[in-house]
Amino acid sequence: MLHTLLVRLGAYAVWMVFPQFFYAQSDTILKETYLPEVSIIEQKWKLSSIGHEILMLDSLKQTIFFNQRASEWLQMEGLVFIKSYGIGQLNTISYRGNTANQNQVLWNGVPIQSPFNASADYSQIPITQGNIRFLRGTNPALWGSGAGSSLLLSPLWIFPYQVQVYQQIGSFGLNQQHFFLQPKLKNQTLQVQAYKLFSNNNFTYFNREKPNAPQETLEHAQTRNLGTQLDYKLVHKYHLWEAHLWFHDAQTQIPPVLTSDTSAQNQKDQNLRLQLVYQTYFQKLKFSSQQSYLRDYLWYEDSIAQIFSGYLSHQWYSDHYLQYQNERNFFQVQLQNHGIFPSAGDVMELPKIWQRHALLGSYQYETLNKKWKHGLNFRYEYIQNQWINPIINFSFERNIFVNGFIKGNLGNTYRYPSLNDLYWKVGGNPYLKPEKGWVYEFSLGYRKKMNYLQATYYAGHYQNLIIWLPDGGIWKAQNMNEIYSNGVEFSGNTGFFVGKHQFLWNFSGFYGQSILTKERFENDEAYRKQLIYQPKYRYNLQISWLYKSFYWHYQQVWNGYVYYTSDNSEWLPDFWIGSIVMGYQWKWAKHSAQIQLQIKNVWDKEYVVIKNRPMPGRNYVLGLQWNY
């Protein structure tokens, strides 16, 4: 059983990553093209996420966004809005009208967002030789994800032996490299990766906040990211051991806003992540134990304002689960423990240890003909001597007619306050209640070979949302917000051949609202208004042409206007940007190589995502990749 599973995973990895393949993806059915031959392969995901959609990189997008940031990929998708403070700067996510700290990033099943502000910077997550997937919607089987989404990161076990070197240079002093090595071992797998990114980000722009809109050059905006990843796996009969390490170091100069001429703000982030995994199989039972250690350090300084502060946390995660599975039924019982040892100088009065424990249960059922399956997830948490309301989620999927399907899920959700919300010395509130709410979504779709179409309606109502408001001249954390969000998402793709030429189309987008449904104070002007930095619509169109060893890809995103004042009296205009990627690859013996040119913001559009934070115009990236 284990050997069969590993063979299937290995075959999938080969099929998914190797650079001379290109794919057009439609949910669980992927179109594989080894130019000019064609075959169809169906993959089934077992992620305790029945009724949810998964957005992932097909081979062509993996080639386009390889060694770039996760924010660059998601920014070019129609379903996700990235709140970007500039190229190489802080990038947080907004999905279905939720806040940045309601989304999470899971590395091998462990959340890696900051325990202080509960959010992650997606500009510091590189797309390397591994799995990266975006889970649309909340799932209580994960680590209490709040109301939003989850970005899932994990290693991808591929060929028995491979070496890969990747180099990119581009506009504004961009220089990034990636190295990957997987030696050939008998019953073991070792992967070594190293990456580095440097950019000056000194692009020119028109400063619309100054008289006559003078052209200026962005200063004090350098970024440098470097890191290494080690992944090891040992298989012996019915036992599996894994070890994972990820070290990441980032230094960022924070540029001035448009209304300022200078900036002396700098930030340093350093992360060390270690994990050990043990799994054993016996007939239809599987037991797994996972131990993880995370060290996160952040240093911020502003020499002009004389602000110097540092944050350090040591985190320990312990995750154990027992699974039973036969042809139709799947059961899982899971126990999670999480401890944080935080330090933040004199800005917070923190406990010596912050603890969290959770009991989870999952059940899934699939009919013999595989046309119907449903799942039930349960989660009950005990956090800092407080029981959290139990979370229950029901989900289903059903094949209808010949090629149609329906799917959906319904459940409640919550989010516990962050350390900043609870313990900040001036304004923190240790009596905050957890955010809570309910969410549901329903999808109807069609899938046949290369053709795929799906529409999803989603809705959610959230209470006790945490917001910082002035009180007697001091900003304080309070449970004041109550929000209702709903909307429609759609996505689809198709393709066809004309001789040896292959053409692919892909589109996605949403239209929705996220409004405040409860007054926070008397005569609250934000009442019944759209939340700030939440676009009502966003669309994406992608067109690809493949011929022999050449490919050409065009991508365009339309982004709706966003309000930046809570009373909706002022807003940033809508914008659309396009990008072109073209490349050629060749192979000889056991070697393959590829050259690629990217033209970002090809129409040189002037746009702003965050008020007073300029974005670059047309820019170029040239990449060269070699594989053995």
Image (cartoon, helix red, strand yellow):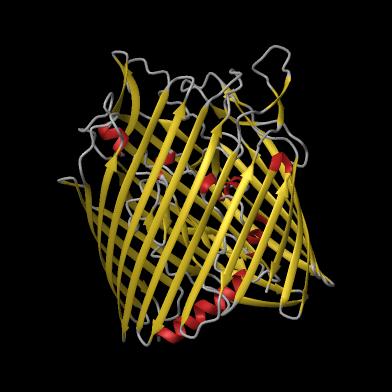
Classify residue 165 by image quadrant.
bottom right
Residue 189: x %, y % from top left:
48, 77
- Give the residue drawn at x 64%, y 55%: 177
Which residue occupies the foreground of this view, 507 or 80?
A: 80
Q: Is residue 107 above or below residue 327?
A: above
Which residue occupies the foreground of this view, 277 or 610?
A: 277
Image quarter in which the N terminus is found: bottom left
Which residue occupies the foreground of this view, 234 or 69?
A: 234
Seen from this angle, which residue lies furthest left? 385
Residue 86: x %, y % from top left:
59, 35
Q: Is residue 188 above or below residue 148?
A: below
Q: Is residue 309 above or below residue 275?
A: above
- Give the residue drawn at x 59%, y 78%: 161
Q: Is residue 110 above or below residue 538?
A: below
Tell me if residue 372 can be seen.
yes
- Give the residue drawn at x 63%, y 47%: 76
Classify residue 501 by image quadrant.
bottom right
Tell me if residue 464 can be seen.
no
Image quarter in which the C terminus is found: bottom right
Residue 446 horizontal side relative to residue 579, left or right: left
- Labels in figure, total: 0
Residue 241 horizontal side relative to residue 38, left or right: left
Residue 87: x %, y % from top left:
61, 38
Residue 320: x %, y % from top left:
27, 67
